[in-house]
Amino acid sequence: MDKRRVRNNIRKLRFYQDEMTQEQLAEKVGVTRQTIIAIEGGKYAPSLELAFRIALAFGVPLGEVFSYTSDEESA
Amino acid sequence: MSYRETNIFVSLASSLLVLGYYLVSWLQMYQEEGLNSAKVFRLWLIVIVATIVLNILGNILTNIVLSIAHAIKTQSKEEPHFIEDERDKLVELKGVKAAYITFSIGVFLSMLTFVFGQPPLVMFSLIIFFSVTAEIVGDIFQLYLYRRGVRYG
C-alpha cells in the first residue's frame, strides 16, 4: 500500500479570505486554535464532520480544502 | 501551551509530588521498622486523599490563572470559554488507554510478588504505586501526543 496522507490548503484559503486568522476559523468551526494549527501543520487529520465544517467556513467543496495524496503526487 | 496542556501539566506535577512522597515515606518505613499494617494503611489514605485534593486544587488554580491571563491578553471582562474539541478527546482517550495498560502490567507485577512469597502489604503497596505511576504515564503520553500530533486508529 502506498503511503498517502491527508493534506490541506487551509493556509492558502485563509489568505484568500482576507487573511482570516486561525482564531477566527477556529471559532467558526467550533474547535480550539491549537487544533487548527495542528490540522494546518499536518499533525492531525480531522474527522469528516469537522472537515466539512471547515470547507463550509471557506465556502468551497471539501476536495478543495483536503486531499489524500502520496508524497510523489503532491510534489 | 494550550489550556488542556496546562491542565495535564498541573496534573502531572501533582502526581509526581504524590509519588515522590509515597516512595520516600514507604522506603523510610521499610528501612526503619519494617511494614506495619496500621502505618501502611495510613500512608495509602494520605496518598489517595492527596491525589484527589491536589488534582482539584490544581484545576481550580489553573482555571483562575488562565482566566486572569486571558483577561489581561484580551483586555475584556468576558469570561473565557475553554472548549474541549475532538482532538482533545482523542488525545485524552489515548492517554487513558496508556494509563490502563501501565496499570494492568503493574497489577500483574504486584501479584507476582505475592506468588513469590512476599506479604500482601507489599502487593497492595505496589498496586498503589502503579496506580499513581499509570496516571503519570497517561499524562506524559498526552503531552507527547499534543507535541507530536495524533492520528485515529
Image: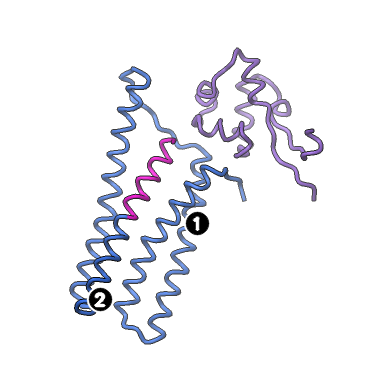
Chain colours: A purple, B blue
Look at mark 1 in the image and give the residue it sits on. B97
Q: Chain of mark 2?
A: B
Q: Reading the chain from its start, which is encountered first: label 2 or label 1?
A: 2
Q: Main secondary structure of the magenta part?
A: helix
Q: Is residue B118 magenta?
A: no
Q: Amino acid at mark 1?
A: Lys
Look at mark 2 in the image and give the residue it sits on. B30
- Determine whether the residue tagged by mark 1 lies in a helix, strand or loop: helix
Q: Amino acid at mark 2?
A: Tyr
Image quadrant for the N terminus of chain B? top left
Q: Which residues are magenta?
A: B1-16
Residue drawn at x 59%, y 15% is A19
Report x, y in % for residue B63. 32, 35
In the rendered structure, the answer to whether residue B67 lies left or right of residue B89 reads left
- Determine whether the residue tagged by mark 2 lies in a helix, strand or loop: helix
- Marks 2 and 1 belong to one chain: yes
